[in-house]
Image (cartoon, helix red, strand yellow):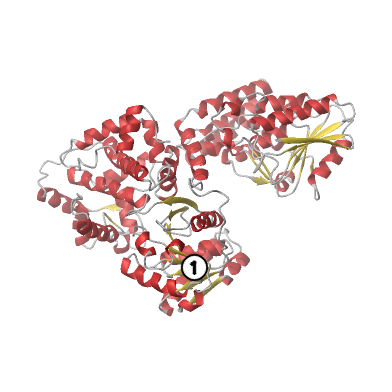
Amino acid sequence: MSASYEVRGGVALITMHNPPVNGLGYATRVAIAEGLDRAAADAAVKAVVITGGGKAFSGGADIKEFGSPKAGAEPNLLSLIRQLEAMTKPVVAAVHSVAMGGGLELALGCHYRVAAPGAQIALPEVKLGLVPGAGGTQRLPRVLGVETALNMIVSGDPVKSEVLAALPGQKLFDQVAQGDVVAAALDFAAARADVRPLPLVRNLKVTHPNADGYFQFARNTVKAMAKNFPAPAKCVDCVEQSLKARSFDDGLAYELATFWALMLTPESKALRHAFFGERAASKIPDVPEDTPQRKIEQVAVIGAGTMGGGITMNFLNAGIPVTMLEMKPEALERGVATIRKNYDAQVKKGKLKADKYEQRMALLKTTLDYDDIKNADLVIEAVFEDMGVKEKVFRRLDEVMKPGAILASNTSTLDVDQIAAFTKRPQDVIGTHFFSPANVMKLLEVVRGEKTAKDVLATVMALAKKIRKTAVVSGVCDGFIGNRMIEQYSRQAGFLLDEGASPQQVDKAIEKFGFAMGPFRMGDLAGNDIGWAIRKRRAVEHPDMKYSASADRLCELGRFGQKTQAGWYDYLPGKRDAIPSPVVAEMLDKHRAAIGMTQPRKISDEEIVQRLVFSLVNEAAHILEEGIASKASDIDMVYLTGYGFPLWRGGPMCYADQVGLFNVVQAMKRFARNPHDDAGFWQPAPLLARLAAEGKTFT
């Protein structure tokens, strides 16, 4: 049953039932249309109320039908709204909880709207690279005014119903009900049963005292804030049509044509891919959604440094008590001081209220004694990235933690199976790789060990949502998904220096492509000594792996990055501006001479971008083939949320699909012929070669 129908005191009540948010899928649209026909034909029915059962009025389009024939099958949403407007009996929308996208457009097609306070009202299509497609850009300006409507449409952000209802002159809501919104709507409908003519939003006039000036201002603002996304500017164009089109239907036709044109853009495809990828990341093939979860009411964090403090804040923000453990009291004091400093900054910026700050700090306890954390449901180790140190911690945790406690390691590269083997309960051990700063970065790599229990995995994935992280499951390998791939990216950056590029040219090329930060600025921020330590380990474990020695030469000069005010760039005290360094330029000249590169070549920005990005793609294909990641979209989510990959390109796998895997493979063949590169690496991963040969895609 997609929608129910009943009659109460001469008013027909149509209630949508399509959980979780009453998406307007085909079956739901059909059921609403049938309900309207039934009400129209029944002489005893004087009015109609439409509402949503459960937790929403309607969240809009049913995402399960995206891309399928059902999405546009008749009655589509435009047809359903036309049917609403043609009703000869008043139709009232009883709006509660959520009315977004098509759900709000449906309500705008009704004659009246009664809202519950606290309902989230939005047209969020711009976040998928689209404009509203069922009249939202034409009707919302008619009920809220041009400026309020355009701000909502361009941002896509929700606004509470009572805020909108309080705006002077608004015609969106006819009533805000303080009690049961459905009961209020039924009473409202009964009281208006004989009122004619029936009001239609399409008949309202749109005005603005300085339309041309305002829309030019809006275009300039959007161009500055969203230069890589075409949809916001198109939203401005569509809202302008609500004012300037010859008729409402002309404006509607303009909006629809814009919607379909945007649907074909690579930016919208990328945003929709990211939207679905984020939701798909929580679905694990062999872990059913109804897997029982362990209760997490208390958390312990081992380590009060940068990572430990950031991890702790995530749980405090979610209202979960944390006990933070360190070996020395001064380390604890520094950790707590840093947490307070971070919260103080939020309070000063108005992002956190003072009472919330104190509530969060009241959830934090500190200790120097492992016995004080023995009753925690989850303990996260955030100590130095050294297997010997991890071993000591996990052997101690195995001794003190209660049965059933989840033991997690915040390792970024180390073997979680080896860590689990330090305990007698490997089924309870899991990797939780937070990204720095852990209280800000959205990504959480959840590393599933060979013996990690399914309920442990399900629990951690659910907990990630609670602390507002995008969690992606990775199998065990060196570097997991993100760092394993970034190593190949960094190797290519080094080879580019060997061949003649400068750090600033490489960084500028990839930043122009859309990365938040190039590989050399990123190295300076993270600390070049970290990569140096990894390369030293690689030299022992994988002596056949080829690297440029330029990064080692840099570290031998003590240039570890921003923390030493000298890395690939120079830095002034207290500032993060990257200044090209003559010392580095001289070092690179000597390095090239030492390796026999007597004639450095000019390298195009296109080659730089392709070598960096396609190195990610090829390594990712290996990761997929090995089962380290279960799907290509998981890899894209790692790079979109943790590594600064441009959102409008959808992640490395989505980008490769849009370039065409045949073209990716052809470029890799060219790179393999470069005597100064690593020809073996550029052999396409078998999965990539097969998909390219078959004309298929990753996603």
Looking at the image, which is closer to me, 684 or 507?
A: 684
Residue 374's spot in the image, x, y percent?
A: 50, 74
Looking at the image, which is closer to me, 499 or 411?
A: 411
Quarter of the rendering containing residue 540: bottom left
Residue 91 visible? The answer is yes
Residue 213's spot in the image, x, y percent?
A: 58, 33
Q: Is 621 situated left or right of 434 in this image?
A: left
- The quarter of the picture where the N terminus appears is top right
Q: Is residue 364 above or below residue 638?
A: below
Q: Is 652 situated left or right of 102 in this image?
A: left
Task: Label 1: state its secondary structure.
Answer: helix
- Identity, as a three-letter code, of the amino acid under mark 1: Ile
Looking at the image, which is closer to me, 529 or 568?
A: 529
- The quarter of the picture where the C terminus appears is top left
Residue 572 visible? The answer is no
Residue 530's spot in the image, x, y percent?
A: 29, 60
Residue found at x 20% / y 43%:
678
Residue found at x 33% / y 30%:
692
* Disc 1 packing (10 Å; few <14; some 14–19; many ≥20): some
Residue found at x 35% / y 27%:
694
Residue bearing the label numbered 1: 339
Residue 117's spot in the image, x, y percent?
A: 74, 49
Quarter of the rendering containing residue 206: top right
